[in-house]
Image (cartoon, rainbow, N blue to C red):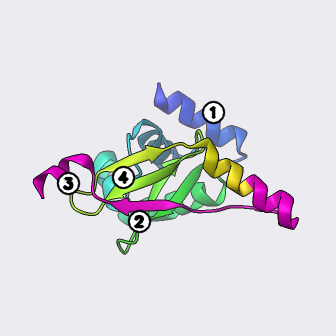
Amino acid sequence: MQIIRAKKILVNSGLEATPARINVLSTCISATRPLSVADVAAKVGSTAHLATIYRTLEKLASANILTRIDFQEGKFRYEYVSDHHHHAVCESCGKVIEVQDKRLEAIMENVKVGSGFSITRHALELFGLCHSCQKKG
């Protein structure tokens, strides 16, 4: 099912639906968290070279199909662009939680209205300890 969806997304974005793009995009669509290049490579298997996966992820991010996320760990992670949200990342176990809060959107709107500044993109990632890691001490 994700393969058909990935093909449609690529075609609708004006990109050629190559096997590598279909595999990488369908992997990102079905993921429950943002994926690194190594994560995608592990899920795709030996069907694509690591450099091909990297170039494909970058191409899909440039086309605004994927979002490139920096969790300050020395590598980017990629996520399929769906509903707007941010992330909370546990610094102990690496768990990633999606954060949706209308107040964050209101802050950006206030900046836009108050300053006339046109926001084209933003990034907000929260770092701390998840509930389980807090309990461990």
Mark positioned earlier in the residue sequence (3 or 4): 4
Task: State yes or no: residue 135 in magenta.
Answer: yes
Task: State yes or no: residue 74 in magenta.
Answer: no
Residue at horizontal 42 percent and vertical 67 percent from the top: 51
Residue under numbered circle 3: 134
From mark 3 to mark 2, how far is it between C-alphas? 20 Å
Q: Estimate the x, y position of residue 56 in percent, counting from the top left.
A: 51, 58
Secondary structure under tag 2 reads loop
Residue under numbered circle 2: 71
Q: Estimate the x, y position of residue 29 in percent, counting from the top left.
A: 47, 39
Q: Quadrant of residue 9?
A: top right
* Mark 3 or mark 4, whichever is nearer to me: 3
Mark positioned earlier in the residue sequence (1 or 2): 1
Residue under numbered circle 1: 8
Mark positioned earlier in the residue sequence (3 or 2): 2
Q: Horizontal placement of 95 versus 64: left or right?
A: left
22, above or below 113, in the image: above
Task: Check contact, mark 1 vs mark 2: CB within 8 A.
Answer: no
Query: Which quarter of the rendering shows the C terminus?
Result: bottom left
From mark 3 to mark 1, how far is it between C-alphas? 43 Å
* Mark 3 or mark 1, whichever is nearer to me: 3
Task: Check contact, mark 3 vs mark 1: CB within 8 A.
Answer: no
Residue under numbered circle 4: 40
Q: Give the range drawn in magenta.
A: 109-137
In the rendered structure, which amino acid carries the disc numbered 4? Val
Q: Horizontal placement of 126 versus 21: left or right?
A: left
Secondary structure under tag 1 reads helix
In the rendered structure, which amino acid carries the disc numbered 3? Gln
Secondary structure under tag 3 reads helix
Check the image and name the residue furthest to the left: 136
